[in-house]
Image (cartoon, grey):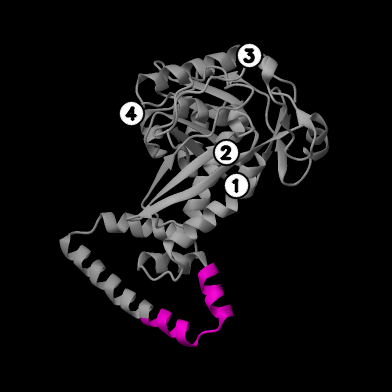
Amino acid sequence: MDTEALLARVGELTAQLDEAGEELAGALMELYGEALERIVDAVADEGSDALKARLLDDGTIASVLLMHGLYPVPLEDRVREALESVRPYMESHGGAVELVSLEDGVARIRLEGHCRGCSASASTLELGIRQALEASAPDLEGLVVDGVLEEPTHGPPPGAILLPMAGGAAPVAPAPAAHVDEQTCELCPIGISGEHKHLIHLEERRIVCVCATCWALRSGDAEFRPVGNRRVWLDDLQITGEQWAAFAIPIGLAFFMISSVTGSVIALYPSPAGATESELDLRAWSSVCAANPELQLEPDSEALVVNRLADPPQHMIVPIDAAYGLVGVVKSSWEGITGGAGVADAVAQYLEDLRARPAVGA
């Protein structure tokens, strides 16, 4: 049984219910909830530890328990567990994250420290925090982020505007190149410069900063791929309003990548809190590809950036690390609730700068 497809179908049918149907669905939920509560109580009283662990490890069962407020592990414990899972990676980059409070289902976390990495790496790190929380605490009703990781030591990507994250500290200017502290390869202790190579971790969809030796030795590993090096401006690419609506992306800016791990097309759209990830309906993506034969993406290593904030819209195939760098640009230029005019200007300039830069050989 395809659980995700079933849940999606339930959502579609629920939206079509009339008043009587809603009342019937509510009554059935109460009945099943009461029965499920008795089952949980029986397992707690007489079930083995192995049985309890097996039930909690089943994602579908866990989702139903959460839906009825019966999951036995408190929300705060699960939030702390999620943050602990990303702590080693953050500490390896000189950063830290802690839970400040959890009230009415809303978690407040604090980012601290100096994240020794480039903007693409930092963006995937923040996405990792969000994904860890979504996996361990899907019932979390909100997330508030205090503080902001300092800018990378070798400066922001082209077009970046150094503005604080909402609730964060004052803007921090990049250090002059002459005073840059050497960054360290993530796969060995060798120092690397600001202009270093990247690998993409396939399972985690995380940018890894590496030295030339590790890039050469590890590019063929099962868990890694080298990032792409194409920068192709697609002046004639057309995406209709109907096609864009089928993607269900709430803003006019996103980048799209093909994941060889999941066999799906992933859309990521930026916000002041980082990147939000969404798996696309393959029919909607196929419709765009059929109308634009020039749209050919290498899985994992490159992305299509679509900027409908510009007039006319901008479309560009870029290396995947440059796509994640765009997330940092949006976050640093976001103002207020809607983002402000600075976001559109910063994104357009970032893409123009990418277009002007010579491709870096892989």
As drawn, the label of residue 7 is none
Q: Secondary structure at mark 1?
A: loop
Outermost left residue: 19
From the image, state whether disc 4 or disc 2 is nearer to you: 4
Residue 303 position within the rendered picture, expressed as x and y whole percent measured from the top left = 58, 31
The correct choice, above or below, for 26 with respect to 331 in the image is: below
Q: Are marks 2 and 3 in contact (CB under 8 Å)?
A: no
The residue singled out by tag 3 in the image is 357
Residue 257 appears in the figure: no
Q: Nearer the viewer, residue 295 or 276?
A: 276
- The answer to which quarter of the image holds residue 338 is top left
Q: Are marks 4 and 2 in contact (CB under 8 Å)?
A: no
Amino acid type, label 4:
Gly
Residue 187 position within the rendered picture, expressed as x and y whole percent measured from the top left = 76, 40
The residue singled out by tag 1 in the image is 263
- Let me know if residue 6 is in the magenta part: no
Amino acid type, label 2:
Thr
Outermost bottom residue: 46
State whether the magenta stretch is mostly helix, strand or loop. helix
From the image, state whether disc 1 or disc 2 is nearer to you: 2
Residue 284 position within the rendered picture, expressed as x and y whole percent measured from the top left = 45, 39
The residue singled out by tag 4 in the image is 336
Q: Earlier in the sequence, mark 1 or mark 4?
A: 1
